[in-house]
Amino acid sequence: MSDPVKINRGLKGVYFERSGVSDIDGAAGELSYRGYSIHDLATQSTFEEVCYLLIFGELPTADQLSAFDARLKAARTLPDGIHDIIRACQHGHPMDVLRTAVSALAALEPQSQEVSEEAFIDNGIRLTSQVPMIIAAHEAIRNGRNPVPADPTLSHAANWLWMLKGERPSDEAARLADVDFILHAEHGSNASSFAARVTIGTEANLHGAIVTALSTLAGPAHGGAAEDVMKMVAEIGTPENAAAYVKAKRAAREAVTGFGHRVYRKEDPRARHMRDGVRQLGEEMGAPEWYEILQAVVEAMKPYARHGLNVNVDFYSGVIYQLHGIPMDLYVPIFAIGRMPGWVIQCVEQLRGNILIRPLTLYNGPDPRAYVPVEQR
Ligand SMILES: CC(=O)SCCNC(=O)CCNC(=O)[C@H](O)C(C)(C)COP(=O)(O)OP(=O)(O)OC[C@H]1O[C@@H](n2cnc3c(N)ncnc32)[C@H](O)[C@@H]1OP(=O)(O)O
Ligand SMILES: O=C([O-])CC(=O)C(=O)O
């Protein structure tokens, strides 16, 4: 019997809202933020500027940028108690620790309860600065070190690396982190941003929506892919093994991680910037084999490219983090650092003319039946 209504499982191809933030052309493999090509932003802009663009809709003037930068820097503080919470769950996955700490911020900072556009922007800017602090503090605490205080002379990306490692990053390392954040900053109605919008649809506060988004980002089909790609590269071991690995995956009808996307049918436009980063960094660090293994996987997947199966943004990012000596379980949290402005502006957009997001499921359970008391079952 055919269903009386058309069901779009996974909401594939369904438009549920209008958005002026980012535009994805999946067929052409193109992405822009507020009309600016991701390629121009990745090569010419900074994460601070992209945050401003996403949140306020226009590129900032020099004065606006410096005022915004000062606002981000002033927000590099965590309330008393957050380090204790991190300490208490230090052995957990960093994504669980980050989510727990953001949830705790909602309880510790009274201003997080306000639901208005201005409050979302204020709280969103504060959280954008606090998220990298939480991740770096956790990394320090779980390794028996004291958290490194933020350095107000450093950019968002450089300060993150400074807090993570306790040493000043090179300009190249800071720029690579900056580009990574720009590329991850926003991506339309992806699963975590959609989940955040669902939370705001109930008129909940921004911190609640960010907790939802973090939970949703953590899965391997979304933000967890970079970590899985690194595990895959380690398992493959040498470029010569890549073809057999892919063949076995395809034979078992299992996903090759870092490939595929719900929207793109050409290569994810963000991937090329990460690919260049892996190649350069690998050569500089005398470890070209990671790039060679990745390219051997791409070669082995070529027969499937005509079905729209190409690399996505996270195919290359994990190896960049690995080359920087960043532990694998920090890859998803790093994605979250970059995605903060995207989540914030999606929540602001949702709040304007808010509507409860509540689709339908078509019932296919048992027909109506009489209740049977427990002693008669
Ligand atoms: C930042 C991000 O979130 S990007 C995504 C990161 N995730 C990953 O890299 C994990 C691996 N990829 C995947 O699991 C999927 O591609 C997803 C979840 C991202 C998208 O899934 P969907 O939108 O359902 O995929 P789509 O409908 O395009 O799949 C089409 C076909 O390609 C196959 N396919 C999709 N991705 C892959 C993959 N990575 N490897 C092998 N086959 C795949 C599907 O099984 C499907 O085959 P079928 O028609 O024979 O059943
Ligand atoms: O858009 C998606 O479905 C996933 C993605 O690439 C992202 O969130 O960056």
Image (cartoon, grey):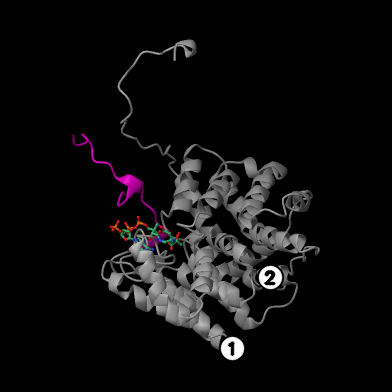
Q: Secondary structure at mark 1?
A: loop
* Residue at mark 2: 159
**Ligand 1 sits in quadrant:** bottom left
Could you say which disc has been placed on residue 286 in the image?
Answer: 1
| Residue 143 in sight from this viewpoint | yes
For discs 2 and 1, the disc positioned in front in the rendered view: 1
> Residue 261's x, y, as percent?
37, 62
Relative placement, left or right, of 215 versus 293 is right
Label 1 Cα crowd, 10 Å radius (few <14 / some 14-19 / many 20+)? few
User: Mark 2, residues whose alpha carbon is within 10 Å: few (<14), some, or many (≥20)?
Assistant: many
Sooner in the amino-acid sequence: mark 2 or mark 1: 2
Q: Distance of mark 2 from mark 1, alpha carbons?
A: 26 Å
Where does residue 195 sit, x and y in percent of width and height? 47, 47
In magenta segment, residue 231: no
Question: 102 or 76: which is nearer to us?
Answer: 102
Q: Nearer the viewer, residue 325 or 195?
A: 325
Tell me, yes or no, whether the two marked residues, 2 and 1, touch with CB atoms within 8 Å.
no
Residue at image coords 44%, 67%: 258
Type of amino acid at the residue the image marks with label 1: Gly
Instruction: Report the magenta residues as a range.
Output: 1-25
The residue under the point 72% across, 44% down is 108
Q: Please name the predominant secondary structure of the magenta segment in the image.
A: loop
